[in-house]
Amino acid sequence: MKIAIIGAGFSALAAAFDLSKSKHFEIEMIDVQQFAGGMAAGFEKDGWKWSFEEHYHHVFDTDKSFKNFLSELGLRDQLIYKRTKSSTLYNGKIHQIDSPLSLLKFKEISFVSRLRTGVVLAFLKLLPNGIVLERFKASQFLIATMGKEAWKVIWEPLFISKFGRFKDEVNLSWFWARVNPRTAALGYFKGGFKRLADLIVDQLQKVGVKFYFKTKVKKIVKTGDKFVLSLLDEDNLVINKEYDLVISTLTSPAFAKIIDLPELKQEKLVGLGAMTMLLRLKKKLLKDGTYWLNVNEKKWPFVAVVEHDNYMSSDNYDGESLVYLGRYLEASDPEYQKSAQELLNDYRPYLRRINSSFDQELIEALVFKTPFAQPISFVNQSRYLPKFETSIKNLYWVSMQHVYPFDRGINHAVKSARKLAAHVRMKTSIL
């Protein structure tokens, strides 16, 4: 049976890994990008020892599916864990808030508000399954339990920056999924996640999996029992290839461009894009050792500052300090269309507030954009979730929209893709 897997992110790689164990499957992977990795794709600069992701990535100690996958690949020993510092920028000051003790010391809200916030977060950490919370809106629940003060200072600025016009529509299960699995120690693959993707590609190629990079799927047509994929290669040549079974790992907007499926028109399957600026600096932006900085100031143009070398050593990047500035917005937003230079001009006054010597330390500013990176989890979202099987026989779908109540992440991508692979093997009676 000839199988096409559209995409080469970690979900696609995990599905291919499991399916390639059967000699009855002939697998071909098609990706428009130059390298595998999906949203965890990376790049390299002269002098760097390690690759670096276009968008910030790490895993948690609770990410068992990812760790098990690495063990099967023989790569588990290259996953590095390190405790990091998380802080919040509020009222012009950076406050460490990454533990119960540091929360109690956060005097920008009352002691009662701090106590209520801590109790609710502890409850969410202990709750084993947060799906039961999906009937509640996160904003309403947090106001009712933590209080208006904690909502206004700690949570509302983040919800506004992350979800924009959807800030009051997000359900509580999504918030639970952001709190429950988090650990103080974060994991990173030695050499970068691009190196991991490259190593997996090497292993898959050795067992016969074929890769077509820089190749775009223009259309999928079902003819009888076969699928015909119209592919556009890097030379702009159209190639038609025939397959028995197709697995798409695309998000719903991208998938809908190549085939007409009723399930892709579900109005609840919406999301925002991600726009990440990467600053290459001569010296650190955040001098206090903070890795992750939530920006809780009003009307700032980015929601997170992530200083990678406060996590992994700058020695891996020729001594450079690498800082991500993250934001979420709709791909139709005029801000999303701006160039790196235009965005840098917008960001510069705010970066100077964080570090007045920013301009002197800047080497380069790069911008990476993904039109769909943050699914919106509405109330009772589980009723609208897509299934692995589409309405067309032997056409399957797995994506970040399948990992609810989690919104994305390598661990969840691997977990859901391996479930799909098992499902395909069962449906095709190849065990």
Image: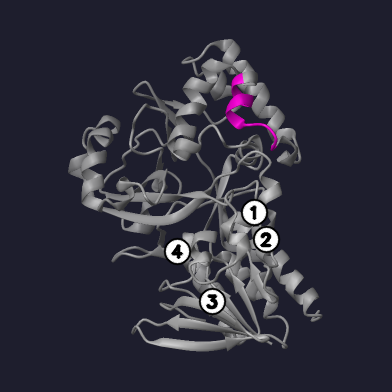
- Residue to which mark 2 is pinned: 416
Secondary structure, mark 2, is: helix
What is the span of residues highlighted in magenta in the rendered image? 134-143
> Left or right: 50 with respect to 220?
left
Q: Amino acid at mark 1?
A: Val
Based on the picture, tell me whether residue 136 belongs to the magenta stretch: yes
What's the CA distance linking mark 2 and mark 1?
7 Å
The earlier-in-sequence mark between 2 and 4 is 4
Between disc 4 and disc 1, the foreground one is: 1
Q: Quadrant of residue 201?
A: bottom right
Q: Report which residue position mark 4 lands on.
A: 41
Q: Earlier in the sequence, mark 4 or mark 3?
A: 4
Q: Is residue 405 magenta?
A: no
Q: Earlier in the sequence, mark 3 or mark 2?
A: 3
Residue 14, horizontal then vertical, whole percent: 63, 69
Q: CA distance from mark 4 to mark 3?
A: 13 Å
Q: Residue at x 29, y 55 (%)?
A: 366
Query: Where residue 201 is drawn, which disc sits there?
Result: 3
Left or right of 399: which side holds 344? left
From this viewpoint, which residue is outermost toward the left?
Answer: 360
Along the viewing direction, whichever of 93 and 176 lies nearer the viewer: 176
Q: Is residue 311 above or below residue 296?
A: below
Asked if residue 121 shows in the view, the reply is yes
Are the residues flagged by discs 3 and 2 in contact, CB closer than 8 Å? no
Q: Is residue 104 above or below residue 398?
A: above
Q: CA distance from mark 3 to mark 1?
A: 23 Å
> Disc 4 and disc 1: Cα gap in Å?
20 Å
Q: Residues within 10 Å of mark 2 (few under 14, many from 20)?
A: many
Q: Are marks 3 and 1 in contact (CB under 8 Å)?
A: no
Q: Nearer the viewer, residue 264 or 308?
A: 264
Q: Are marks 2 and 1 in contact (CB under 8 Å)?
A: yes
